[in-house]
Image (cartoon, helix red, strand yellow):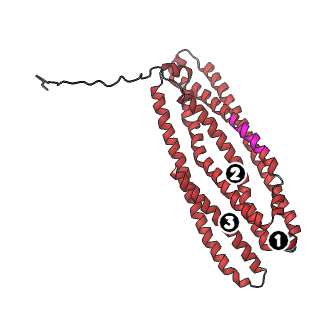
Amino acid sequence: MPVYLAGAVMLGVFQTSLNRIDWLSKAAIDGIFGASPAGVVRPALMILGLAVVAFFTRVGSRWFIFNAGRDVEYEVRAVLLHRLHRLGTAFYRTMSAGEIMSRSTGDLQQVRLLFGFGVLNIINVVFAFGSALQVMLTVSGRLTLASFAMLPILMVATRFFSREMFSRTRQTQEALGRLSDVLQANLAGVRVVRSFALEPRERARFDVANADYLDASLAFARLRGLMGPIVGSASAIGVLAVFWYGATLLGRPAASGGITRGDFFAFWLAYGRMTWPMVAMGFAVAIVQRGRAGYARLKEVFDAEPEVTDGPLPAPEDVRGAIDVRDLTF
């Protein structure tokens, strides 16, 4: 938790620096087109300093949060190994070695991505929205509403992809487990396969399992491929709305809701910072659902009950006496 807190603080400083860069850019643009163009040197130097701060805090946030995800993977892997050592033969009759290997590799990797890249994106989206909205609403509430024209469609699409991503991830990992099981059985029993000339039969089994995994992977890839264009199209329509409606407000008096060139440039920078979180939200949803599906498969191993369990320990007795060691030789 302290590592995640440090990463979140870094992301907060990063988005705050970008927020100040937006306002300094507004002041610089208004200064260039105003009465004192020479006064833009100070804002430009401050922008440069804030950009350096943003660079180091961005790198630092990824160092903290990504390493936290790897620590989670290390701990979960250790717990998984300890659990597998305690389980008996009844469990290994119901879950094949290929399934166990699939969960110990692919599913565990999805859990690491969930607690690393997924957490990073979720925290960054929250800070980016807050940082960008402060600039956008201050510049123009009307223009902000126009830029959110596609937000309802984006929310509906995100909900749909979230549900489908979870189910298709489980199907892909289960198909991989069946494929690994067939391969492991053939490698372990290669002498039996050769002795009874079972190569064509086992090759056919492998082809069927391989085709199932291919179909599941392609279905998952099609879903991911569809998510990017939909989210990107919604963001692009928001960009068109910003330019169209912003052009009508540009140059108007401030009393009637008009904005200056600097206002429009700052708004554009802020909206650009919020466009990526809109796209990253789709990636975050995919990573979260894949991580949930992976952990659900790992939980089946964690929840399995061993055949032999320790009973309650008896109450300690008050033992008194002495022990004599006699005629001991080595």
The alpha-carbon separation of the residues under discs 2 and 3 comes to: 19 Å
Examine the image and state in which quarter residue 248 appears.
Answer: bottom right
Q: Residue at x 69, y 47 (%)?
A: 283
Q: Residue at x 58, y 17 (%)?
A: 198
Q: Secondary structure at mark 1?
A: loop
On residue 280, the disc is 2
Give the labeled residue for mark 3.
Answer: 19
Give the labeled residue for mark 1.
Answer: 259
Considering the image in quadrants, where does the C terminus appear? top left
Q: Which residues are magenta?
A: 156-166
Q: Amino acid at mark 3?
A: Asn
Residue 50 position, x and y percent, is 62, 69
Q: Amino acid at mark 1?
A: Ile
Residue most extreme to the front: 318
Q: Which of pointers 2 and 3 lies earlier in the amino acid sequence? A: 3
Residue 216 position, x and y percent, is 70, 33
Q: Amino acid at mark 2?
A: Ala
Q: Is residue 52 above or below residue 197?
A: below
